[in-house]
Image (spheres, coloured by chain):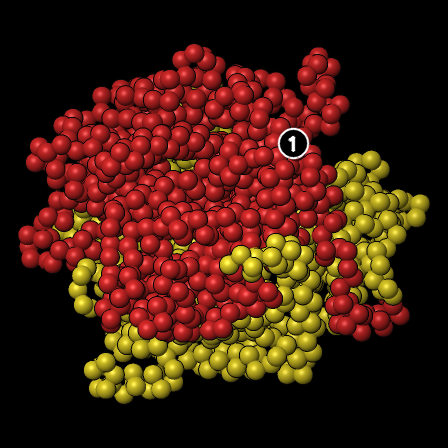
Chain colours: A red, B yellow
């Protein structure tokens, strides 16, 4: 408590109700939190703007999340629709545009907790795939919510494998209509958001048939509910698919179509058309579709995947600086230790914190890459598409997988209180887990990256040119790592080279196995299948290596901010060494690292934990989440965790109602007890 | 379909509505599923009994889980209380005793989905810790549910570290009462099951004070609710802690005590007592308490941890044999492939299946160990206690961690449908996840095992005798693994030796580091902290090794059943080689395995996937879960997954009610659209 008397900042904190255990963590930051926040935001100007917008939203009761953890699926859905409609009104009033910076801030704050997000995908797909006439007809209606759209692609029986979709659209020349059908139960549309209870229209993906010939999957605008009474249109069966691990507020739906007729004009026809006489015409390039899918995978990373990890780190690190448990020095008179002072707790949380920064930076890199790729494509140069596709697939898979596991580690590291919904961690986990599944199943995605890498590897071996991101594949293999001291492993050149060699080795050995199998007579597809475990691993290693490399490059560019650069260098080292420590086999396998060197890696890695621990709280503070945005009883800025858990628990519906269970089942048992006691 | 015509069994299946894709998997079993089931049950007699009991429960609507995934916390609680009260009545009617085999079957089937389980812990703690007089007074009341008990140990501020509990019990000589208090908010009891809304009494653990002196934590029986109207007693604040990731049916509670007075006789006093004049007397051994805690950790493994993994495997394997996605051979005319035929899917699911068997067998071993330990203790021989404690801690941590990760892998491997609550997988995951946290936090537990191992290692180095399970620590280190061919890695002696060496190496290097730090002047407790990451890893490796060793021994004993022995040998090999493949660094580190040998491990491991894949469905069938017990739209015996998902979804409350959101928010937007379309 001596600290308390001597320190103005800490005194202020206590006066403001901040737990002294947390306040003291903020006194010793080795860098300016405000500066780091501005850098993460992309400038102090943007930080100010974001804070102003967040302030405006948080003061609006429509956006309150106060009772979120207590609400049923029906209540969550209703609140989410209310927000969506209200937000649209507010945007009009404020003059904010759909793609403006304000709306981005709002969606970041909302973290997806709003309805009608698929309505936006509905609009985007019409904009991209529709003819000018179609865009002119549908977009204004959708913009004003005069119709509500959804996007019906996935079916009960088919997700990632789109060619397998079974819904049919048969052209009827006589009436100039398409007749849509769900030929069997597995063809039922399943999962589309906003479709279960909200949408009046949807874009249906179906196999196009003209004169009995199948032309593959095409998009059609289909009205599914009456605009008068919201009842399903004739031939339409539509409903909600029921409870999920999260996304209670979204009405993911099912849709069955029985001889539903739509006019010829409702097939989205920017790239192809069925003419009145049944002639199928295709023009333009379909590659742009491919690019859209690619872009979506990258666009989800920031808000849907990395943000949850940042929030989970914030909650877990702050809690661990407040939670005291057991004594480091047994039988001593001293206070119990903060759990953040235990090496095992540091080893759980700090690598996740480093990863959150690593992924934030790779996300920026990926966006830059996409923007320049997009410009090339506008100029009809499609050369970068394969690389972009490989990037988007592999990084989507790696980042979602890593972040999911990271959030789970944070949850478990908070013990029982982490398991309470009130900690905010369970909903972060169940949300980020979904990202491993949607927008392409991760294993399938890794294998798409692997296919690209194998091609590049072959090209490199044949001396042909390959894209810049994979030129390392043609580098020559050094015999072994030159590190002699644990400090050598804080040299980025040392660990980057280790990652590079590891990634090359995993890919080249997969390629060799594939080659060997094919040469020994195994059919190509079967040989591929027999190599997929190793190929997926190689693809992941490639992405991991590029993430380390990009982190190193980012740190180098921070040379004008010494304090920030120093702590970022620590995080970069930690991210890299944790990866080596956790995947030791991949580095030891061919002797590139020796066992003795692995000991040095371990020593440096464990040393870093103790170093970064000192800045752990400022490092999560820099993410700049408001308490309302975190919505966590454990993670609030003031660290008053026990008080808040108690206050929030009292509001639970399980406390507001005397359960009928007492009168029905317990009272009859208990009523005669008194005489016996 | 030729198969269909030629095969009676398959024809029958189809007639019975079994999906032919699943039926065909059952035709080729290399062993008798019925025989394997009987073996898992511990005899055909027991299988028959279990099936009869399960049949009786499932025909009883009180035990129906039909709408479980749609219920609110309040509804789940009410249903669970109803079941508990009803079950007690049924037990009396049927003459089933608390510890009889029938009740065990029922609880296995219920999988914890019943209220008043803490009431049983309340009773157990009185039986174990109470004097004869106390047992005679309280047990009959509790047996008849004339009082309802809970067990209030954990506080907001303290879980695993019991010495830190802050609730106080001060003896008042004048009135011969204890005065119980919650001195601060962190001292509030938090988490006890059955306390939030049900219990009338609870065992409170509090720091005992007599004449101002603290005697440490002791148990007290405290009445918390009126027996007349169920309202909290004077000085008692009690309620429900609100929503959690699972266990909605359990009223985990909070409890605050303000000058609550209880008679001196309410301190449980088998081992110690405060006499009327305030003299504190202790007698008997407290070691038996220690043993109880140990036993509880082992007792949860079967039903709460391994069973969920078995269920998750059953669901995911059956679904993967029915789900077809994409073509293994592109552009071919053949049907899409079952996802179970993809190597990557096999690599996800089959190691989990092997682990489920491995843990089933180690669980039997642990129970045998405990039973013999218990007999020794009855004879006042406490020699085996440290080993038993180390076992229970380490295995609880390893098995819960592995099973949690295994269930999550199964969930993800089912893609989007796995994410639906209707798959049953989310609730299995959230349930098993809790087991990593309760009954001792896993990292703390691993470190307790590590402490025991370090002691044994030192003793072994000094030539002193050590317990049988750790004698391997004194074995001499061979230079390297002799395997030369991939088939050598199907030799249990080869892989057991590799595990043994790895476990010894991890422990000895931790011990050396610890020693080195202490010799270089670091304080003991700080040195320990700096080694904890490595110590926890060493403890886990020890448990992993013993699990492999026990699986090998189990397979050897199956020599009278050739078919079963063969498939179990495959599973044992898979479990062992998957462990080496996934933790390659630990085996490569000191060169015990070379990179070339690791390639052989990988080859054998991948070969095994293809072998076991053929028996995957029969292997999960052998777990013998009924459809109602699985409660999964994806995992039912008949494989009609799409039909069932659709049927169940229609029953969701989100479909039974027109959301007020339409009339309130959407209708006003849509009502003027019609004129524009």
Answer whether residue B181 is visible to the viewer in this image: yes
- Residue B211 x %, y %: 84, 37
The residue closer to the viewer here, B603 or A144, is A144
Q: Badge 1 sits on which subunit?
A: A
Tell whether B463 sits left or right of A515: right
Tell whether A231 sits left or right of B480: right
Question: Residue at left 71%, top 48%?
Answer: A649
Answer whether residue B324 is visible to the viewer in this image: no
The residue closer to the viewer here, B548 or B155, is B155
Question: Residue at left 48%, top 80%?
Answer: B51
For label 1, the residue is A55
Q: Quadrant of residue B201?
A: bottom right
The residue closer to the viewer here, B464 or B507, is B507
Q: Secondary structure at mark 1?
A: helix
Quarter of the figure with the N terminus of chain A: top right
Question: Residue at left 36%, top 17%?
Answer: A556
Figure check: A67 above or below A671: above
Figure check: B451 above or below A82: above
Q: How many residues crowd around disc 1 within 10 Å: few (fewer than 14), some, or many (20 or more)?
A: few
Figure check: B522 above or below B644: above
- Residue A642 x %, y %: 70, 39
Question: Residue at left 54%, top 21%?
Answer: A45
Figure check: B210 above or below A495: below
Q: Quadrant of residue A187?
A: bottom left
């Amino acid at each position: 408590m001596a600290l308390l008397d001597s320190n103005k900042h800490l005194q202020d904190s206590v006066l403001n109700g901040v737990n002294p255990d947390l306040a003291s963590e903020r006194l010793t930051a080795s860098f300016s939190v405000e500066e780091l926040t501005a850098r993460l935001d992309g400038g102090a100007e943007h930080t100010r703007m974001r804070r102003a917008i967040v302030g405006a939203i948080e003061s609006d009761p429509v956006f309150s999340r106060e009772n979120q953890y207590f609400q049923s699926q029906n209540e969550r859905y209703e609140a989410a629709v209310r927000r969506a409609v209200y937000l649209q009104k507010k945007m009009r009033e404020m003059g904010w545009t759909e793609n403006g910076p304000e709306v981005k801030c709002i969606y970041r704050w909302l973290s997806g907790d709003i309805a009608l997000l698929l309505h936006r995908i509905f609009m985007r797909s019409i904009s991209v795939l529709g003819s000018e006439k179609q865009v002119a007809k549908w977009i204004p209606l959708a913009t004003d919510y005069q119709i509500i759209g959804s996007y019906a692609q996935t079916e009960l029986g088919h997700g990632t494998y789109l060619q397998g979709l079974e819904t049919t659209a048969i052209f009827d020349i006589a009436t100039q209509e398409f007749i849509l059908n769900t030929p069997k139960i597995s063809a039922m549309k399943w999962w589309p958001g906003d479709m279960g209870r909200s949408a009046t229209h949807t874009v249906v993906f179906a196999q196009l048939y003209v004169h009995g010939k199948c032309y593959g999957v095409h998009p059609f605008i289909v009205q599914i509910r009456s605009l008068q009474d919201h009842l399903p249109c004739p031939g339409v069966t539509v409903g909600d698919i029921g409870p999920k691990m999260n996304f209670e507020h979204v009405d993911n739906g099912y849709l069955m179509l029985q001889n539903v007729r739509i006019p010829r004009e409702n097939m989205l026809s920017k790239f192809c058309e069925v003419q009145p006489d049944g002639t199928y015409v295709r023009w333009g390039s379909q590659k742009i579709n491919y690019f859209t899918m690619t872009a979506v995978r990258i666009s989800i990373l920031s808000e849907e995947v990395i943000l949850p990890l940042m929030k989970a780190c914030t909650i877990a690190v702050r809690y661990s600086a407040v939670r005291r448990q057991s004594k480091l020095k047994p039988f001593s008179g001293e206070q119990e230790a903060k759990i953040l002072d235990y090496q095992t707790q540091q080893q759980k949380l700090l690598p996740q914190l480093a990863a959150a920064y690593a992924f934030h930076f790779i996300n920026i890199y990926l966006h830059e890459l996409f923007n320049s790729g997009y410009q090339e494509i506008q100029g009809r140069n499609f050369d970068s598409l394969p690389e972009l596709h490989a990037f988007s697939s592999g990084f989507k898979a790696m980042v979602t997988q890593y972040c999911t596991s990271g959030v789970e580690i944070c949850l478990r590291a908070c013990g029982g209180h982490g398991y309470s919904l009130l900690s905010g961690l369970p909903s972060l986990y169940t949300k980020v887990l979904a990202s491993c599944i949607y927008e392409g199943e991760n294993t399938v995605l890794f294998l798409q990256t692997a296919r690209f890498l194998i091609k590049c590897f072959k090209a490199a071996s044949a001396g042909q040119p390959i894209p810049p991101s994979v030129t390392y594949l043609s580098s020559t293999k050094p015999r072994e790592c030159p590190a002699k001291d644990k400090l050598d492993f804080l040299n980025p050149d040392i660990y980057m080279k280790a990652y590079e060699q590891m990634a090359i080795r995993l890919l080249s050995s997969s390629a060799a196995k594939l080659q060997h199998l094919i040469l020994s007579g195994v059919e190509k597809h079967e040989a591929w299948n027999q190599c997929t475990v190793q190929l997926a691993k190689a693809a992941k290693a490639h992405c991991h290596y590029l993430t380390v490399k990009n982190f190193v490059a980012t740190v180098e560019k921070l040379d004008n901010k010494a304090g920030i650069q120093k702590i970022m260098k620590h995080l970069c080292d930690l991210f890299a060494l944790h990866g080596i420590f956790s995947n030791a086999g991949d580095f030891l396998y061919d002797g590139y690292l020796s066992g003795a060197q692995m000991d040095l890696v371990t020593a440096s890695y464990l040393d870093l934990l103790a170093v970064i621990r000192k800045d752990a709280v400022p490092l999560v503070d820099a993410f700049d989440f408001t308490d309302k945005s975190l919505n966590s009883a454990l993670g609030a800025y003031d660290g008053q965790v026990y008080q808040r858990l108690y206050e929030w628990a009292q509001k639970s519906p399980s406390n507001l109602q005397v359960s009928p269970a007492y009168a029905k089942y317990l009272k009859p048992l208990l009523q005669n007890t008194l005489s016996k006691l």
